Amino acid sequence: MKQWRQFAQLLRYLRPYRRLFYGALLATVISVGLNALWPVIMGLAITEIGNNLAAHVAINFDYIQKVIVLIILEALGYQITLFLSSWWMTLAVQRAMRDLRAALTDKIDRLPVSYFDAHQQGNLLSRVTNDVDAITNAFQQSFIQIVTSIVGIISAVIMMVLINPLMTLLSLIMIPLSLGISRAIVHYSQPYFKGQQNALGDLNGYIQENYTGFTVLKVFGQENQAIEKFRTVNHALADQGFKAAFISGLMMPLVGMTANMTYAAMAMLGGYNVVAGIISLGNLQAFIQYIWQVNQPLSSLTQLAGVMQSAGAATARVFEVLNASDAPQQRTSAQLPTPVLGRVSFNDVSFAYHQDQPLIKHLSFVANPGDTVAIVGPTGAGKTTLINLLMRFYDVDAGAIEIDGVNTQSLTADVVRKQFGMVLQDAWLYHTTIADNIRLGRIDATDYEVVDAAKTANVDHFIRTLPDGYQMVIDEEAQNVSLGQKQLLTIARAVIADPKILILDEATSSVDTRLEGLLQTAMDRVMQGRTSFVIAHRLSTIRNADLILVMNHGEIIEQGTHTSLLADNGFYAKLYQSQFGDADDPV
């Protein structure tokens, strides 16, 4: 039932192109009908020649000539309608699949962040590419063949009934027998086709993840472990693929054997009927041809079973994404007061990714406009989660987060996010020009504003040393700029967005001392007059913070300034001592 519902959903994408689709079906029916006439027309010639030879008279070439003309016209009409059906179906399917890919992309843009946290990027990519391709192949190639086969069988059976109803009834025993065999094989092979598509998605996800972290694997010497993991994933795909192909591959020989037995029996019975004068030799020839016209489509249908099962599994994976719940869209007219000052408060906030594993517990603090709030703590303390809540990637389970006294949950996510600028450690750049990468912070920014933002971010000089300056294209993996330069560019992006609240997520780690100095200067400039949240493991970068929140296990265990926290000689002092050797504040 679920598969039929998904198939009905899939057909909706063909609806705008139904004229092309129905035109292709009509052309297919006509081509099959014309093909069904061919054995009868040939039978006319054979019967005439046989009668002439039996009567010991000259062959009636005038009659044969007319039959040949009919054969030529039939063949011409068949080829034209066959071409039209293929052309129109290709147009309809390609346009429908274009719309399906667009719908998938649009849907992915609307999914909540939690969906991406739970699914591999490569697996999602496989659904947009491999799974849609499987559906495209099934519709474009297999659908026409299915219609051709079904209409061909019906047409052939009608012509067989007109020649000899009794022989037709006996020969049709092969159809339910073949369908029974096909149904049983489909039932047993379908789980393996579904497993094959899932394994293909897992393989894509693993490859994408592995290649993204290729340098890290090299650094830690994990190549052999990566190869072993790949073998495991690859073998899983091969195993599912073999079982799916082997079981579905049994269909054609079994159905073919049934058809061959029917063919042999009808040839013997037909020969007896010709001798008995029940049917003519030409009609026997036509009847035998029609048996093959029934057998061939049945064989085609069995061959297509594997393709259709793959498409069915792919359809399920595609609509698993399309039917997933969107990120909540609030319809609210609530707005922040004008002008936005940037006061942020956490009021008894609690949050858990999983209900049985609370992460943030009763968190409260206030960041006044222009304050720099540093968040420190060990891995898993809840620092990144805090940023996710600020940006409303996730909503709090209890308590409230307020901006200028307004609960962020009463605002749309877009309104909240427009107040923030982000500079991440994992600086993400588009495969486009440097200018357009900076302009991502504000699409309508002028060239002058782009350059001004770059100067503020200490990256203008570097850009001007490049061959094409601001028009240099960042390559696909952003390998033609260093990590520190990427971070400077993201600072420029934040500058041009001109947000009231800034988030700096470990932006100065993993760079050399000179670049760290440039980054720190750029950050100091961009943080002026803005409420800033800084997450950093290098405690030397946050000495001047107005407020330092020390987190552990989702709770603020200490808060204060750098000096006061050192004086308390608590958790923060121990962190500082582990980096600098003692808890004295060096000048």
Image: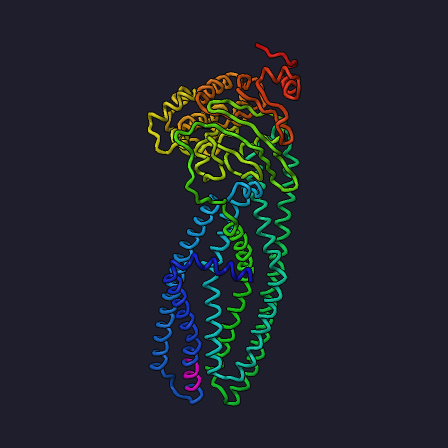
Q: Residue at x 59, y 45 (%)?
A: 202
Residue 416 colored in magenta in the image: no
User: What is the residue that sits farthest to the top in this orientation?
Assistant: 587
Q: Position of residue 376 (x, y in %)?
A: 59, 25
Q: Position of residue 312 (x, y in %)?
A: 54, 58
Q: How was the colour assigned to the protein in this rendering?
A: rainbow
Q: Nearer the viewer, residue 541 or 399?
A: 399
Q: Please tell me how many numbered marks the rendered image carries.
A: 0
Place residue 555 in its image quadrant.
Answer: top right
Q: Residue at x 55, y 17 (%)?
A: 543
Q: What residue span does the magenta drawing correspond to?
A: 45-51
Place residue 550 in its image quadrant.
Answer: top right
Q: Nearer the viewer, residue 264 or 389?
A: 389
Quarter of the figure that contains the N terminus? bottom right
> In the visual, does 154 lie left or right of 445?
right
Q: Where 195 falls versus 343 (above or below)?
A: below
Q: Is residue 285 visible?
A: no
Quarter of the figure that contains the C terminus? top right
Q: Nearer the viewer, residue 86 or 52?
A: 86
Q: Would you say the magenta stretch is mainly helix, strand or loop? A: helix
Q: Position of residue 441 (x, y in %)?
A: 41, 31
Q: Is residue 85 visible?
A: yes
Q: Where 28 falls versus 90 (above or below)?
A: below
Q: Where 323 falls versus 524 (above or below)?
A: below
Q: Position of residue 515 (x, y in %)?
A: 50, 19
Place residue 173 in its image quadrant.
Answer: bottom right
Q: Residue at x 62, y 32 (%)?
A: 554
